[in-house]
Amino acid sequence: MRTRGFEVVTKYKDKNINLPQRQTLASAGYDFEAAEDITIPSIWCLDFVRIYRLIRNGHELNELDLERAEKILKPILVPTGIKAYMPEDEVLILANRSSNTFKRNTALPNGIGVIDSDYYNNKNNEGEIYFQFINYGVRPRKIKKGDRIGQGIFMKYLKADDDQPVSQQRAGGFGSSGV
Ligand SMILES: O=c1ccn([C@H]2C[C@H](O)[C@@H](COP(=O)(O)OP(=O)(O)OP(=O)(O)O)O2)c(=O)[nH]1
Ligand SMILES: [Mg+2]
């Protein structure tokens, strides 16, 4: 019987994607690999330093600089080529690897990622899992396909009394349920 686990999404079939694995007998997290080579640029580009100085010196930013800063600070989505299935009352929590911050200045700006069970094969896509990263260090972070980028932990979640979901069905992720 299949209860919970991982599958490769169609786009990455035959692309040598490894399913997430735990490293040791008592590791809580399944380590995910990057599905592609990808570079996460440092936020500290010249434009950002200039904008940072403007803010520090008490200037109000014009719309163009606000947009530039927002673009620089937008997290990079790293594809995993993986989707996860699990019972409805479970969730897969994505967490950073401590070495990403300790050695490589790369954080998950969303703190943790929440992978809902209804993200798997939802009505708009297959439910590929992405890790969002921000590089607050000064070097570009070069990720190679197959590098272990983060981990996923399966957990049970609880429901409140008189719980009423707003909608029955999920249609995507990353803001699909509204603003
Ligand atoms: O780091 C993440 C976080 C989320 N997701 C996917 C799976 C999750 O089920 C879906 C929605 O995530 P969440 O509920 O955290 O985001 P939201 O902004 O509320 O989007 P939505 O309105 O689609 O629920 O996006 C990822 O692939 N990686
Ligand atoms: Mg949501």
Image (spheres, rainbow, N blue to C red):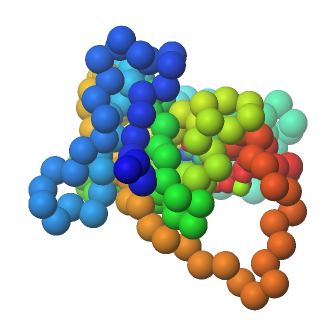
Quadrant in the picture for residue 58: bottom right
The image quadrant in which ligand 2 is located: bottom right
Q: Is residue 43 visible?
A: no
Answer left or right for 39 relative to 11: left
In the image, 107 versus 146, the foreground residue is: 146
Is 72 situated above or below 117?
Answer: above
Q: Residue at x 79, y 78 (%)?
A: 163
Residue 47: x and y in percent read 61, 30
Instruction: Confirm whether residue 28 shows in the render.
Output: yes
User: Closest to the observer: 112 or 114?
Assistant: 114
On screen, 101 above or below 131?
A: below
Horizontal relation, residue 23 to residue 120: left or right: left
Residue sticking out furthest to the top: 14
Residue sitting at x 78%, y 49%: 169
Residue plotted at (74% across, 31% down): 124
Residue 28, horizontal then vertical, whole percent: 27, 63
Where is residue 158 shown, x and y percent of the image?
Answer: 60, 78
Q: Residue at x 40, y 40 (%)?
A: 6
Q: Residue furthest front?
A: 1
26 is higher (above) or lower (below) than 78: below
Is 177 rendered above or below residue 81?
Answer: below
Q: How many marks?
A: 0
